[in-house]
Amino acid sequence: MSTVVIVGGHGKVALLAAQALSGQGHAVRSTIRDEAQGADVEAAGAVPWTLDLEAADTGDVAEALRGADAVVFSAGAGGKGGPERTRAVDLEGARRTIAAAEQAGVRRFVMVSAIGVDEPLPDDTADGWRAYVESKREADATLRGSGLDYTIVRPGRLTDGPATNSVRIGRGIEGGEVPRADVAAVIAAVLADDSTIGAQFDLVSGDAAISDALAALQ
């Protein structure tokens, strides 16, 4: 089994992904901003690693990734702190993590992005939403150009319902929602499936098993 580092390890998707991966026997290391979040990470089966992604430099992030086989970037400002903080976490934090993966020799990289971020934004788009969409878009582009073995997962609107293992995966899906538990299951599945390297796809609830949906990408 492998060692996986989840950056942004206290998020809801991240905690579920840690639970899924650790349940499969992987060693999971999850970065957290606040040591008080460590108990939640441990309960999910992961080892907490305190790292303030906004304050850290590339070397700090590389140290968190050292010895890992894969990294999952699931960090996000969550709309807190306005457009500047969104860009600091969702874009600059992602870029720093990509550079750190290259520095630490971690080639496998899964990005948790968002559906529809390549679509043009109306002129009257609110500043916060514009910052979020543009940050995700640019972070994805940086990863695609990095030369790393990437998979970019772009879920629709996230819900807290139970896992269904029934999804729709593809390109250009227009909206939809998906349980966070299914996103976590997809993250675990792509890390086990090298055929997803170089893939970027939208993810919403559907009627295909995750394994079948991923196989259809080939």
Image (tube, rainbow, N blue to C red):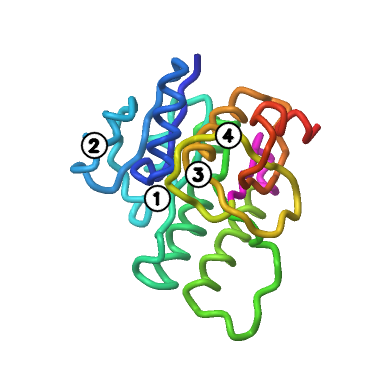
Q: Distance between the residues labelled 3 and 1?
A: 33 Å
**Label ID, residue 38:** 2
In percent of width and height, residue 162 lies at: 45, 38
Q: What element carries label 4?
A: helix
Label 4, on which residue?
A: 186
- Please say if 76 is above or below 206: below
The answer to the question of whether label 3 and label 4 lie on touching residues, with beta carbons closer than 8 A, is no
Label 3, on which residue?
A: 179
Pick whichever of labels 1 and 4 is earlier in the sequence.
Answer: 1
Residue lying at the far right of the rendered structure: 218
Residue ID at (33%, 25%): 45
In percent of width and height, residue 93 lies at: 46, 54
Q: How far apart are marks 1 and 2 (CA)?
A: 22 Å
Q: How far apart are marks 3 and 4 (CA)?
A: 11 Å
Pick whichever of labels 3 and 4 is earlier in the sequence.
Answer: 3
- Please say if 33 is above or below 85: above
Pick whichever of labels 4 and 2 is earlier in the sequence.
Answer: 2
User: Residue type at mark 3?
Assistant: Pro
Residue lying at the far left of the rendered structure: 36
Pick whichever of labels 2 and 3 is earlier in the sequence.
Answer: 2
Q: Quadrant of residue 123?
A: bottom right
**Label ID, residue 218:** none
Pick whichever of labels 3 and 1 is earlier in the sequence.
Answer: 1
